[in-house]
Amino acid sequence: MELAERLLKGDKRACARLISLVENEDKEAVDILKKLYKHTGNAHIIGITGPPGGGKSTLTDKLAKMLRKEGKKIGIIAVDPTSPFTGGSILGDRVRMSDLTTDPGVFIRSMGTRGHLGGLSKGTQSAIKVLDIYGADYIFVETVGVGQSEVDIVKTADTVVMVMVPGLGDDIQAIKAGVMEIGDIFVVNKSDLEGADRTALEIEMMLDFKKHNGWRPPVIKASATEKTGIDNIIEKIKNHKNHMVKTGQFHIRREENIKLEILNLVKEKLMTMIAKKSNDSNEIDSLYKDVLEKRLDPYTARDKIIDLVKK
Amino acid sequence: MFEDEKLEKIRNSKKEWQETTLSKTISRFPERKEKFRTGSGDEVKRLYTPEDVKDFDYNEELGFPGQYPYTRGVQPTMYRGRLWTMRQYAGYATAEESNKRYKYLLEQGQTGLSVAFDLPTQIGYDSNHPLAEGEVGKVGVAIDSLKDMEILFDGIPLDKVSTSMTINAPAAVLLAMYIAVAEKQGVSQDKLRGTIQNDILKEYIARGTYIFPPQPSMRLITDIFEYCSKNVPKWNTISISGYHIREAGSSAVQEVAFTLANGIAYVQAAIDAGLDVDSFAPRLSFFFNAHNDLLEEVAKFRAARRLWAKIMKERFKAKNPKSMRMKFHTQTAGSTLTAQQPDNNIIRVTIQTLAAVLGGTQSLHTNSRDEALALPTEESVRIALRTQQIVAHESGVTETIDPLAGSYYVESLTNKIEEEAAKYIEKIDELGGSPKAIEKGYVQKEIQESAYDYQKEVESGKRIVVGVNKYQIDEEPPKDILKVDPEVERLQREKLENLKEERDNEKVKASLEALRTAAQGSENTMPYILDAVKAYATLGEICGVLREEFGEYQQSIIL
Amino acid sequence: MSEKPIRVLVAKPGLDGHDRGAKVIARALRDAGMEVIYTGLRQTPEQIAAAAIQEDVDVVAMSILSGAHNHLFPKVVKLLKDQNADDILIIGGGVIPEDDIPGLKEAGIAEIFTPGTSTTEVIEYIENSVKKSS
């Protein structure tokens, strides 16, 4: 049976293989995605992001378990950093989701960033599509969580859950700029720790300073290990989507994301074409030299490169 | 330790020696390496002189055996009075088989028992649990209920032997079973001597046989402290273990630091639970590793004793000297044993035995030469025991107390290990104490770094392991390896089924429900566990109730 | 980084908690440029096989020190075979007696690494085997 067919039937092995193929930019995989693209768009894509040590994996595990009780099919993508020196990585998020491994309604995939910045890996977008076609009702995307602004997730997810922990202290000030913009739901995890109330209050205050487009992000205290607040998060995730759909923002956000994705794909494609051109002849390389030696300016060089690629 | 004038003289003659005798030799025959290092990677100088211990205050730093700060040993006469307890860790297959091995070891002159449990027992599963498949009786004896425990100690008078049990997460249950067996033998609790490992923190760090999350685990531990201080006063309620931390790849300094940091956490937890420090601290004991780097190891043991004494006195304000006295068990290092040319392991174990004895251990397990291959055979176990006996009776190192004291090298190394370990403890305090540092993965990460560095050193040939990366030979695969009969698993399950038919199941149910209520509240759980055990509730059933009430620990891995 | 990295599942089947070896191997494989998925302790054969499939790994590397290898290793092989995933290379390590090795190989474990094996040997073995099959 063809990979495409098997994927449509919900075959895990086909799903897994296809994710690898798209991750490795295999041509066959792109063809399959072209063919099956019309089957995407059903899953609710939820970004799980926030600083390191916040317990994102454990929280994802608990959210997935609760949705499983409703009989929903779950996809999880967990991204971890790739070493820029060796190209290798250790992907350890599964450790906290061990119980879900053998659940037939759950598919978990670990991905290395492979040089991509912004909190996701290059293949994440395509992997989401594969899981969507595979039939997942909810797809959780857990970002790297290196504490930098992880902007990719907003361009990818329908709902972004920002996971914080008590005791971040001054850090909250430092990261708020990047963070406050992207969270649709704020979770203060490990709420059994000291300072949870204060952290929640601080986030509330910061949110009060902002303008909201009809959706004031809720702040939820939870403890993934104690299993408190999980149902509340699920409810808010669902509410968020309902709100978005009702107000038409869902469409606007998806359209915006699709636009960004396509432009990205164009950019990538252009870069590959330039690289190929540059491999085939030294026309492009000589342009660089011309700019270096002031025979040419960078702007004219750009126009010339575009002309060359067009040919 | 020396007057300034004399020191000056020594310094001058050293300089002269360096410029004349030494430099002449070195220019013709350079040393083997540019830098020499201890097993932990600390640089070792060419020569140690009084200069290296110049600020040393004998009375303060060393004192006398059996007195604070116990650097020279915890008893006034040490091995001149009584040799250490030779205690071989043993147990495999069924209780019947292990019982035979214990009787054999006692006949061979062993003076204490040390029980190894299989993994399902250590993790609180009965032999018929799906996760127990393939593991029953493998690394130790399978114990499902009091019935097995009765067989395990059949014909062994529990008022005569001291028994050490390597059991952690379900320690309370196994201790309860031991008490119940003793009762049936007519031996009252207050006569029982022995140790349970009961050290959950190092399970999270290094050994992996945890069940419950830290908080309820610490509660079970303090419940045992309290129960034993009243009812089983001669029992060592915990064996705070650096052994497995070292096996996981830590350095000697890290072994001392992380073990003592865990010790601090237990003492604090008991104090927080309302116990008086001197009521339980005398029953704390420790468990260390003996590696090959002989002198560093001796220094490690001495440093650990001194540091613990100071912690108990200064940090916890203990008043009873017994609370400050660090008694410890030692085991030779399993991780140093090689599968290649296994007989070489006998020599490694001999060096490690010397380290433990020169370091003043209270009891010792010597590993068998074939442990990198499989479970030890009877012959290998005997050689391992004989190694201790030869060191005890023939080597002469037991005739005086702490014979390496005063060595410029050993004393300066002792100081250094103590200092560096204290620094680690400070860092752990900053992180909020050991349980927090473990949750953050700090301790695990430090150990993994050391383990990985060690591996790289071996692979690059920087560190020589005889028979592994140098002096290799072609050898026949070893024969006569002990294997556990897979039949054991079936037998054990059968016994379990029979038990469930024979016992009074109403009584079992009632005792388990009583335990559940106690677990939900704040009462001491120990008496309820004892009742359940006596009703022949199984280990799996008892731990099952506690699992439901306490939840299960999830590993935080950091690589 | 256009060449696709080799993906390896490093797993600890059974109940033993000695993960020094597994962790050292995981790091060494990462430093050799591989993507290592680490499962943590106490994994059942079912969990290992399911993870291997979802992660679409090239290799499953298992470590066990408790002596339960004869029982657990072949089970993983069988589960993968049942799901048509017998193209995944399966290797094992730990305290494994020499006499058990032929039986394990027969059961489908490609290679067994016993104590004293260098990480370089394991890396080379994986690189060579995965290259050959793809």
Image (tube, coloured by chain):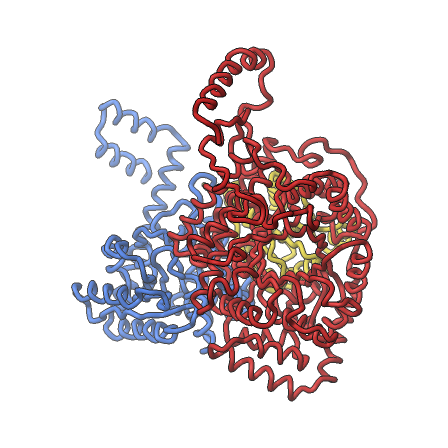
Q: Is residue A187 left or right of residue A84?
A: left
From the top left corner, tell me how far across and down residue B372 is, in percent. Answer: 71, 47
Is residue B119 visible to the viewer in this orientation of the structure? yes
From the top left corner, tell me how far across and down residue B335 is, in percent. Answer: 64, 46
- Reply above or below: B46 against B197: above
Q: Quadrant of the C terminus of chain A?
A: top left
- Reply above or below: B354 against B470: below
In the foreground, A114 or B151: B151
From the top left corner, tell me how far across and down residue A161 is, in percent. Answer: 33, 64
Q: Is residue A261 left or right of residue B334?
A: left
From the top left corner, tell me how far across and down residue B136 is, in percent. Answer: 71, 65
Q: Is residue B148 left or right of residue A265?
A: right
In the foreground, A114 or B457: B457
Rendered colour, chain B: red
Residue at the (18%, 66%) spot, across then down: A208
Rendered colour, chain C: yellow
Residue at the (33%, 52%) spot, across then down: A147
Q: Which chain is blue?
A: A
Is residue A9 visible to the viewer in this orientation of the structure? no
